[in-house]
Image (spheres, grey):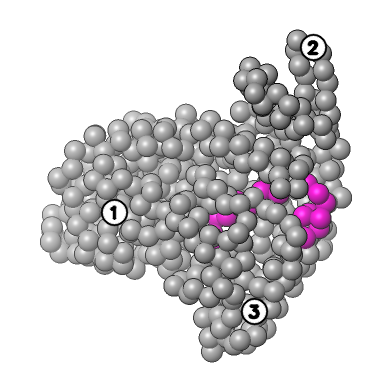
Amino acid sequence: MFFHTILDVNQGFVFEHNEYYTFLFAFSNDLPYLCIIIETIRLFMRVLIVNSSENTGGAAVAAHRLKDALNKSGVKAKMLVREKVSDQLTVVALPKGWLLRWNFLWERWCIFWRLHFSRKHLFEIDIANAGSDITSLPEFKEADIIHLHWINQGMLSLKNIQAILSSGKPVVWTMHDLWPATAICHYARGCTSFTDKCHHCPLLPGGGSSNDLSAKVWKRKKEMLKNHSIHFVTCSKWLGNEAKKSGLIGKQPINTIPNPIDNHIFKPQDKKKSRENCGLPTDKRIILFVSQRVTDRRKGMDYFIQAIETLAQKHPKMKENVGIAILGGHSEEFVGTLPLPIFPLGYVNDERKIIDIYNSADMFVLPSLEDNLPNTIMEALACGVPCVGFKVGGIPEMIDHKQNGYIAEYQNAKDLAKGMEWILNEADWQSMSNHAVKKVATCYSQQNVAIKYVEVYQEAMATKEFNL
């Protein structure tokens, strides 16, 4: 195991990993010594971030950005994923083999069978019954902190997580949705069973039963956590409040830290040049909609369509001077379905082009029905683009009403249209843009987020060291 070394520059004392917290408390009344020690701990700390994907999905993007933020702050962070797609040295992949694919397929088959061979909800449920043991990997052995993120769909099983907890290493788990706090679902959709124990799951055929799949997985998760401590982190206050209600993890330590973004990369750029780079018209105002999969109903495309239809009916001239840019998979399916010109951009993985797309927009709209802390809103704000979204999840924590965007009443397409109209025709756009950039710099910068995570890491290590 890698040992931390703590050096007292005046007396030449050297302490190894299992002694430095005793040393820390011994000098807790001497502020200069304490500051040196805390800084040294940060500089020698090794963190292993574990996530199913390297760059596909919001959790992967957030985990990757956190890795970069930590490394820039002096923490040695690596990311462990199922399949590596980049050439970054700080990203490592699980050993290749047929078992990786089998873990994914076996879990899907088990869920498919429980759904009576219906594809409905097939990818809304995870039971973590198959995964890879990472405890023997050198990256695991050298790490001081194991930091779990989104580990579903064959990355880690509950048995694998239990092995991680039994290793004695401190574990931090960032929740990108509610799955760690429920049995099998990622979003509760109004169900409150997880506040006591999951059963009669609405995602299962016939609404489940008292001893359905959710009840069985709940028991397994409960057993996994028995006599173990995990420091949970939620990306939004909304998710933090939901997690604290959980009968599964509600008594575990839960902090709220937002996802980071590099606001030196995501920043305002020349709008005309950005549109030329993306092939978007320079003579129209552009409304942007973004989702990894545009047809995902959770992202609210139905409400977006209703709002656009309302606007076009009220302002017929918008057909001439306003266009809709749609970024994400299946975006071409919506060509001709709206009363305004649509510019489908498809799925884009090039960060530079994504930044150009955001900078092409006059407004970003994401009417999610359930969401945590959407990276897309953060990216739009960083590029100085006012945003519109429903009052749900962590979205109201990001959009300050009528300062950097508009918060519409939940599932109210008319209010969504009202917010879009207000930004287009009434608001001081430049003032809103400035507020958007300031919001990101204040709340979501890499440095601010990294510092907060280091504090959680230190707390987790102290808890493990002293069995608190």
Residue on which disc 3 sits: 215
| Residue 224 shows up from this direction | yes
Camera-nearest label, 2 or 3: 2
Q: Is residue 317 left or right of residue 194?
A: left
Camera-nearest label, 1 or 2: 2
Q: Secondary structure at mark 1?
A: strand
Q: Residues within 10 Å of mark 3 (few under 14, many from 20)?
A: many
Residue 252's quadrant in the figure? bottom right
Q: Is residue 308 left or right of residue 380?
A: left
| Residue 68 shows up from this direction | no
Residue at 49% from the left image edge and 73% from the top image edge: 192
Which percent across, then down, holds residue 236?
A: 47, 51
Residue 167: say if magenta. Answer: yes
Label number found at residue 11: 2
Residue on which disc 1 sits: 407
| Magenta-colored span | 162-178
Please name whichever residue, 322 or 370, is drawn nearer the observer in this view of the structure. Answer: 370
Q: Secondary structure at mark 3?
A: helix
Q: Amino acid at mark 2?
A: Gln
Q: How many marks?
A: 3
Dot 2 or dot 3, earlier in sequence: 2
* Residue at the top extreme, as displayed: 10
Residue 112's quadrant in the figure? bottom right
Task: Check whether the beta carbons of the residues at disc 1 and disc 2 lie within 8 A of each other.
Answer: no
